[in-house]
């Protein structure tokens, strides 16, 4: 079905139905259609939040030997603490590889803030012992690593490989 241009996200979402089928009962249509429209609108809003600094994250083909796993998009407006800190968007990607029988994971989070002063305050106020946190403009780039070998407890910290990934991402944000 073609959606007329110039409509809001909610109006465009209202044109979609589940699996392309219209419910047979008018009563079901009145209940499902607004709920589905709200769901589609929230997904579109979340994908809009995922743009921006998230483009600085490295893709797997840019890191030889590493795989990448993205976390589901999170809308910061749903978390009162994030709203209070002024977070506009979150981007999280985990880079993984099996290196000589040891699983390495480098997690990178980019938090985008409404302004540089909020990002600076957050950078000064956050203290996570096993994370490296750097401010780049209105964003915080947070990097952490995990090593996991068979029959050995995992080791968390900021390892040289994760530092290198974080440095490339910070350079892209500059």
Image (spheres, rainbow, N blue to C red):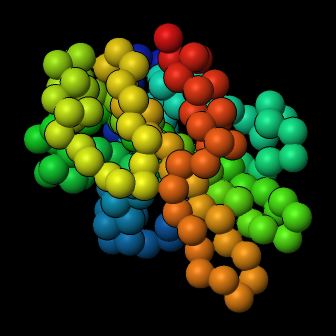
Q: Quadrant of residue 31?
A: bottom left
Q: Point out the residue furthest to the top here.
A: 174
Q: Position of residue 134 (x, y in %)?
A: 39, 29
- Above or below: residue 9 compared with residue 69: above
Relative horizontal placement of residue 73, taking residue 31 as reference (left or right):
right
Q: Residue at x 61, y 48 (%)?
A: 159
Please tell me how many numbered marks the rendered image carries: 0
Q: Residue at x 34, y 46 (%)?
A: 75
- Above or below: residue 115 compared with residue 145: above
Q: Point out the residue furthest to the bottom here.
A: 151
Q: Position of residue 63 (x, y in %)?
A: 80, 36
Picture quarter with the N terminus: top right
Does the image show residue 37?
no
Q: Residue at x 26, y 48 (%)?
A: 127
- Above or below: residue 159 compared with residue 53: below
Q: Which of the pair 89/35 is nearer the observer?
A: 89
Does the image show residue 30?
yes
Q: Which of the pair 158/96 is nearer the observer?
A: 158
Relative horizontal placement of residue 52, taking residue 41 as reference (left or right):
right
Q: Residue at x 57, y 54 (%)?
A: 145
């Amino acid at each position: 079905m073609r959606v007329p241009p110039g409509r809001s996200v909610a109006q465009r979402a209202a044109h979609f139905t589940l699996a392309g089928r219209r419910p047979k009962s008018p009563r079901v249509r009145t209940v499902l259609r607004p709920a589905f429209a709200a769901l589609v609108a929230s997904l579109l809003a979340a994908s809009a939040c995922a743009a921006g600094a998230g483009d600085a994250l490295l893709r797997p083909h840019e890191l030889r030997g590493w795989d990448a796993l993205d976390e589901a998009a999170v809308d910061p407006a749903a978390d009162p603490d994030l709203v209070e800190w002024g977070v506009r968007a979150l981007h999280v990607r985990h880079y993984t590889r099996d290196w000589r029988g040891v699983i390495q994971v480098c997690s990178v989070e980019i938090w985008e803030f409404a302004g540089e002063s909020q990002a600076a305050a957050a950078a000064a106020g956050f203290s996570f012992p096993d994370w490296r946190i750097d401010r780049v403009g209105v964003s915080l780039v947070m990097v952490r690593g995990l090593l996991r070998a068979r029959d050995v407890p995992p080791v968390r910290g900021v390892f040289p490989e994760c530092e290198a990934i974080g440095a490339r991402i910070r350079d892209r944000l500059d």
